[in-house]
Image (cartoon, helix red, strand yellow):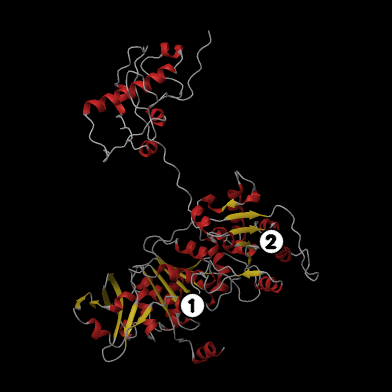
Amino acid sequence: MPLPKPPTKPATLLDLDSAPLARATRTKPRTQPDVAPQAAASNIAILGQNRKAALLQATPVGDRADTTGVMSTQAAPINAQAAPDTKAPAALPIAAARAAGGTPATRPPRNAIAGATLAPDQKATASVIAKPALPAPRAPKAPRAAPIRAALSPDAIKLFVLDTNVLLHDPSSLFRFEEHDIFLPIVTLEELDNNKKGMSEVARNARQVSRSLDGLVGDVDEGIEQGIPLGKLGSREAIGRLFLQTQALETSLPDTLAAGKADNQILGVVQALQRKFAERQVVLVSKDINMRIKARALGLRAEDYHNDQVIDDLDLLYGGTLALTSDFWERHSKGMESWQQGGYNFYRISGPAVAGFMLNQFVYLDGDMPLSAQVKELNGKTAVLQTLRDYGHPKHAVWGLTARNREQNFALNLLMNPEVDFVTLLGQAGTGKTLLALATGLAQTLEHKRYSEIIVTRATVPVGEDIGYLPGTEEEKMQPWMGALEDNLEVLNQGSGTGGEWGRAAATDLIRSRIKVKSMSFMRGRTFINKFLIIDEAQNLTPKQMKTLVTRAGPGTKVICLGNIAQIDTPYLTEGSSGLTYVVDRFKGWAHAGHITLQRGERSRLADFAADAL
């Protein structure tokens, strides 16, 4: 005898709720009078009998006989018509009942069906136990892209064609165009494949872009021609689509442009797309200036990649200082509190100037009542200012060095403060960035014993042609790049005149034993504990490289970044996209970070005049 077919879906209260019976409302209808409790209970029992009877009628006989304690039936349509002797109203949907002028049926309790009594003519061979209904699964949240893209007209969504250098410069540029679409020519993929080998930053970026493309293209339900959602990998900003070139496009470039050159092939793709999608804006995005010029000469739209830039105007870059107005005391002296602690004066003020303050920012005022202070605390409209130590006085000299101007005094207060873990110094050539950092590092390492050693590193980007490979160990290879370190050590060692030549030689050996020169190529994975880390020429670092270096800091380590954003030697890196600009903007306002832009050059009168005139 063949066994009965197992049920495909167990009947639970969830199934009963999904039947086309009237859903109940938990609130009492206002338009109908109160129903007697006995009548309401009778209706609930009748509804439970009808549902249960329908389920038992749909159960095969074999299933009924073998079932003990648990109902296992195959879901079947439930007859919503009540028996003649029960006088139950026909079930109507809630909306239909309200439209007809009636009232929706009251939802029965969950245990009413299980406890209902069967009609006399309905025999059950097993007891029926209704399991608690499982909560309905939550519907997945609709992606944010749908309403935004739906609200935009098709011509408002641009189609950006990315050049290879954009992807090699910023691997995450695929997800930086928000609601707009991206098109990648096939020659761009070829160039990515040609640049993926090696250990350089360009090779790593090429491999990262390839992995992102592989994650986007994999498991594509629709055809690639329809576009791939850029938010597939979890990016919330990218709500557009990615299009890949899947067929040859007809181009009509001038004969003077070589057809085999990759840049010209990309220009041909942009031209074909502009002709094919005349209603949309097709824009070429490239870091190559000459390619953008050629595109505009051909009547094509072309733009630079600006998403990696922290700021558009360098005048808006945080400088770390703020000049107070001449009426500062008149407007902020009311209710001012002052006290002394640890040899410093503190002022708690409130007024309109507090809104423009940032933590660890330096404020100054010239005049009859001068003030030079640092913002130590911000609490709404109230700020606490702390006076500074005057490092311009010989009594407070650091390793024999004194401050020559206001900004250098501010910088020394930051560098000598053990509560400040991250310091950035910007300034043109000759402002004393490296000298200040090295002097404070030696004083806190050899005199105060605050740090165990000084680590100096820099980006090895040549100004002119590269001289090739260098022999020797890691430190020997870095020595040609550390000419600035040697020059500043010579200046600082001139002050140790005691002991004659032997004394200076001993001091030089002691200093060199505490200074380690490291290459950036071997920084990944390291942790510096109780170190004074100096990153020189930081303007040549990308934001990713800067993050790699700063995150090497362990407990008790201080990181100092030095640089001049007007002297960037790294290709495709500008003042707005430099890693030094990036950290200055991101660390401003943090209680354990500070920044100063040095203004005056102190190297020599010749260097000062050359910096201004040339």
Q: Residue at x 20, y 79 (%)?
A: 336
Of residue 458 and residue 116, the one placed in the foreground of this image is 116
Q: Position of residue 381 (x, y in %)?
A: 26, 72
| Identity of the residue furthest to the right in this view | 255
* Three-letter code for the amino acid on which mark 1 is drawn: Leu
1 and 2 marks in contact (CB < 8 Å): no
Q: Residues within 10 Å of mark 2 (few under 14, many from 20)?
A: many
Of residue 94 and residue 571, the one placed in the foreground of this image is 94
Q: Which residue is mark 2?
A: 273
Q: Which mark is residue 80?
A: none
Rendered view: 1 above or below 457: above
Q: Position of residue 4 (x, y in %)?
A: 50, 14
Q: Position of residue 299 (x, y in %)?
A: 69, 71
Q: Residues within 10 Å of mark 1 (few under 14, many from 20)?
A: few
Q: Position of residue 344 (x, y in %)?
A: 24, 78
Q: Which residue is mark 1?
A: 314
Rendered view: 600 above or below 226: below
Label 2: which secondary element: helix
Upstream in the sequence, badge 1 or badge 2? 2
Label 1: which secondary element: helix
Q: Which quadrant does the C terminus fall into?
A: bottom right
Of residue 182 and residue 218, the one placed in the foreground of this image is 182
* Three-letter code for the amino acid on which mark 2 is drawn: Leu
Say which quarter of the image contains residue 12.
top left
Residue depth check, mark 1 versus mark 2: number of the one nearer the observer? 2
Direction from residue 256 to residue 4 in the image, left or right? left
CA gap between label 1 and label 2 equals: 36 Å
Direction from residue 301 to residue 38 in the image, left or right? left
Q: Is residue 402 visible?
A: no
Q: Is residue 351 visible?
A: yes
